[in-house]
Image (cartoon, rainbow, N blue to C red):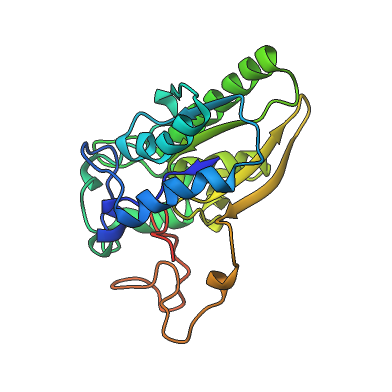
Amino acid sequence: MLRHARSTANGDGVLAGRLPGVGLDDHGRGQATDLIGRLAQVPLAAVVHSPLQRCAETVLPLTRERNLEPIVEEQLSEVDYGEWSGRKLSDLVEEPLWRVVQHNPSAAVFPGGEGLADVHARAVAAVRRLDAAITREHGEHAVWLLCSHGDVIKALLADALGQHLDSFQRIVIDPASISVVRYSPLRTFVLRVNDCGGSLESIVPRPDEKKPGQGSGSPADGSDAVVGGTTGA
């Protein structure tokens, strides 16, 4: 499970949602190219991605290198944030719904958009359907890659970990991070979460570094998750 590389919206602190025309920034394009080396030793039976531009751009260097035709899956698209789309995260923390998203996300429905419970249901159903189809075609040891969005992948991981959706804000998924889940008939196995490759130096807090979610209107302890996913180190 690959989150798309860093987008222009990530860099601007904007909740892009499904707005068109949101591609990768320069750093994100470098992350996309780096995927070729990061996955060099991983055979891929298929590459599946959300229909949004930033996901297509993320997998393009890899699929060209592997000569794979990617599969576009609508049900792995970003959350429809409705009226929140295109707004600054620093402004959204002032909205009453922000606290619901943080503490009771299964009850959160974005104005003019969709609910996180619906996102969870559609994404889990899509991944299980795709995994079953790829397994039938390529065998039980087939490995495939999906490229989607922060909150979608967090919902998938919560399901794989057997957690209620209300716990999904405990999971951090950075741009271009890879999480690995193995599905079996009786249970799922979570092998890796938020692997960004290379050094783990970035997980060590710096004295001058704000905690995730800390900012105007947020608790001083930084306990809020970033809606839509973090913007990376």
Whole-percent x and y of residue 45?
A: 61, 24
Q: Nearer the viewer, residue 99 or 65?
A: 65
Residue at the image point whose x is 66% and y is 30% from the top: 143
Q: Is residue 25 visible?
A: yes
Q: Nearer the viewer, residue 27 or 128?
A: 27
Above or below, 198 against 140 in this view is: below
* Residue pictured at 40% horizontal, 67% vertical: 213
Side of 143 relative to 154 (left or right): right
Q: Nearer the viewer, residue 26 or 209?
A: 26
- Residue at the top extreme? 137
Percent coordinates x, y for residue 35 in the rendering: 51, 45
Q: Splitting the image into 4 quarters, where does residue 210 fall?
A: bottom left
- Residue 161 placed where, x, y %? 67, 44
Taking the image as shown, residue 95 lies to the left or right of residue 156, namely left
Residue at the (68%, 13%) spot, across then down: 136
Q: In which quadrant is the N terminus drawn?
A: top right
Please indicate, yes or no, whether residue 117 appears anywhere in the rendered image: no
Q: Nearer the viewer, residue 45 or 74?
A: 45
* Quadrant of the snapshot with the C terminus: bottom left
Q: Position of residue 37 (x, y in %)?
A: 56, 47
How many discs appear? 0
Q: Quadrant of residue 98?
A: bottom left
- Judged left or right of residue 196, residue 52 is left
Q: Which residue shows up at 56% across the image and 70% down it?
A: 203
Task: Pick out the residue farthest to the right.
Answer: 186
